[in-house]
Amino acid sequence: MSELVTPRQLEPLGFAVPSTVPTHWYNLAADLPEPVPPHLHPGTREPLTPDDLAPLFPMSLIAQEVSTERWIEIPQTIREIYAGWRPSPLVRAHRLERALGTKAHVYYKYEGVSPAGSHKPNSAVAQAYFNAAEGITRLTTETGAGQWGASLSMACALLGLECEVWQVRASYDSKPYRRMQMETYGGTCHSSPSDLTKAGRELLEKYPETTGSLGMAISEAVESAVEDPNAHYALGSVLNHVMLHQTVIGQEALVQLEEANERQADIVFGCAGGGSNLAGLSFPFIGRNLREGSTTQVVACEPAACPSLTQGEYRYDFGDVAGMTPLLKMYTLGRDFVPPAIHAGGLRYHGMSPMVSHAVNLGHISAIAVDQDTAFTAGIEFARAEGIIPAPESCHAVAGAMDYLRTSAEDGEVVVIGLSGNGVLDLAAYEQYV
Amino acid sequence: MSELVTPRQLEPLGFAVPSTVPTHWYNLAADLPEPVPPHLHPGTREPLTPDDLAPLFPMSLIAQEVSTERWIEIPQTIREIYAGWRPSPLVRAHRLERALGTKAHVYYKYEGVSPAGSHKPNSAVAQAYFNAAEGITRLTTETGAGQWGASLSMACALLGLECEVWQVRASYDSKPYRRMQMETYGGTCHSSPSDLTKAGRELLEKYPETTGSLGMAISEAVESAVEDPNAHYALGSVLNHVMLHQTVIGQEALVQLEEANERQADIVFGCAGGGSNLAGLSFPFIGRNLREGSTTQVVACEPAACPSLTQGEYRYDFGDVAGMTPLLKMYTLGRDFVPPAIHAGGLRYHGMSPMVSHAVNLGHISAIAVDQDTAFTAGIEFARAEGIIPAPESCHAVAGAMDYLRTSAEDGEVVVIGLSGNGVLDLAAYEQYV
């Protein structure tokens, strides 16, 4: 009934993809005045070599991880899949403007139109493609709110891979629909920590009542991939190649603003957990600032309950709890930090993308923390003005922008909100605020 | 925190809506060779007068209900709201074609990108607008799967109305997220039959264990509206003006097929419960057949468990269970028919749109019945090929098209599937088939 497609289907179908779908990913590393600090081997503390990463990732993604090329071509097969929902809409928030009484021009870049309901498929499709192209047959991953796990399951179905997902227990228990979404795509989903891995068993023994965390789930997914020669691991955020794949968002927004006769964005608000939506939307704007002297401000909106950028230290730390990943230079709350079970599961991460961290450290991105009540209040207001119920993650960006619009925005100023996804599978969280 | 917008916001914002958003609704009644049989007064059995309908609907919608004008202009305020997600995508199902090994050209017209996840906002926004314009402050309605209730709640939030929804008990119990969606938009949702209405109390007494039905919920919503001079009733399907509003779907598809260099659609598959998605997609094609001699076939795909078109009689019947509505000439299983609690709650209706029924009776639409297993199997196959998880209702159209593609389609034939919505809030139903 539902056989997976075979790897030969990596070949492009050959139809003409509209020119509005980006042809390249944009790499901010090419334009930053200082190189992105390299990831370090946890044993030697020397910069990682490609061989160090080979058990986890295909060579093509490892090359992207350390690339300093400005433009990296998107394979035709990936563009064909992107064309199913890209370019995503950039919508003028006319009714929100009226509700707020602002004379600023407010836009939202809406990724919720993707089949999985968020921006995550932009990287999931790319990662599944490059893994399948190198003969891998199975991908493992972690997921917080479930957006990434659902997206990778979808991408694996389209490209002929098995997919196994460890979902943070707090989300697994409270959001059963996400697991069902993964299973409908043919993926497998476990509650993390699980008894399927050594890392999981140790965590369960130590913290039997834990709500789980992204750091724990990463440990499990990495362990499972390393033990299977036909498997690799896929990460939904944090790493440089993920930021790269997401830049289709910002590239489209630049073009769409021009089409709307706006000279540029004055300020961009994005939510920040691991950093992929923020990076995807903002890096093309920051690159233009650096290359052409434009002056778009970028604001990262993170949850007050997990404030890596506003309260963390900028230093090398592990990406996971068990200390199995490379050391990453990033803003971190410490790998042992277990964030409270806030509803924006996708933002419950102790660290932050090294590229985003580097850009923050160099002053190209500023950061604010938004508490959960403020985020949901803003989300409900947005829903009743614009019709779209934002994902809890996106609510942080909406809240940051709405506060700015109420207190600081000038007439005619162009404000762009990154709406990373819709919140239809997060309605139980809204329920508590209605 | 979340005040509703005020009625003065019915005024258009005045921005330039893209020309790709239709400017008029299309009325098939203008092109059919025989007039659509009028609705009858249940007492006199005479054709209804506008005054008969005035307790339930605003005069502008009553005029649309009986209009024989071919084109009815869409007010600017409604076009501005439509522009948030319209035109909806017409996507070539390249990977599904490959999976099926067909040389037909398969397209799906995808309404799941709307904020509420289905085609229902096309009429919800229109109905909320015309009611608000005539001073109504509260709308009542019924909902099956919850798509319509969520859409009307959204439309009421955007246009400044209260919204009260009676949801069929089977859906209310199995799909709590839909209720939460309505409440996030500020709507109120009751399980039907409820003890809030006389009709509901009588049904509860007679059938305490009932799973409910659209017919029962309609009785309750109508009763509640009639008793409140500031309230009107809104119906999500069946009536002529609803079919009218949905024709933006098919109008866009005609243009999009031309843009894709297809001369026409050879065959269109739509799901049919009350008929609004099928009518919206197919009526502009049928109109072109009638006016220009094109030969697009239209196939209504209804659930085998509730087969009004394939097993019902074409006669006058009530639209609800209690016999409170006008008599409608339609294919009906009888108003007492209580369909089994199938997952496609939006298709659980004993009757069928009089306009769709008339078009079927005149031979412009053919009908097939699809059983639930076949529908979900097709939906899962579609999801794993195209990424989108179709709504259970839409699965019936997908199944009808896939059977045709496997058995009858010729090379180069153009097949269009009406994908009325996405199934993310219906994943619990998929769960049983995975």
Image (cartoon, coloured by chain):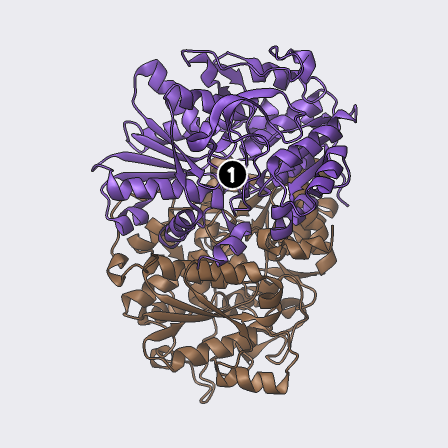
Chain colours: A purple, B brown
Q: Is residue A401 left or right of residue A18?
A: left
Residue kind at label 1, given as amino acid type? Leu
Residue A311 lies in what quarter of the image? top left
Q: Position of residue A165 (x, y in %)?
A: 69, 38
Q: Nearer the viewer, residue B40 or A23?
A: A23
Q: Position of residue A242 (x, y in %)?
A: 55, 26
When asked about the image quadrant of residue A219, the answer is: top right
Apparent side of residue A179 relative to residue A251 in the rendered image (left or right) = right
Residue B283 against residue B139 in the figure, above or below: above
Frontmost residue, A100 versus B121: A100
Instruction: State which quarter of the image contains the N terminus of chain B.
Output: bottom left
Task: Work out whether B164 lies above or below A355.
Answer: below
- Give above or below for B392 relative to B42: above
Residue B311 placement (x, y as % from top left): 68, 71
Characterize the local packing of mark 1: few (<14), some (14-19) or many (20 or more) Cα atoms within 10 angstroms: many
Q: Judge whether residue A323 can be spotted in this image.
A: yes
Q: What residue is rendered at 64% in x and 18% in y?
A: A42
Q: Is residue B102 left or right of residue A428?
A: right
Query: Position of A187 compared to A347: left or right?
Result: right
Q: What is the residue that sits farthest to the front in this orientation?
A: A206
How far from the left and from the top, in percent, is residue B228? 36, 80
Residue labelled with disc 1 = A347
Q: How many marks?
A: 1
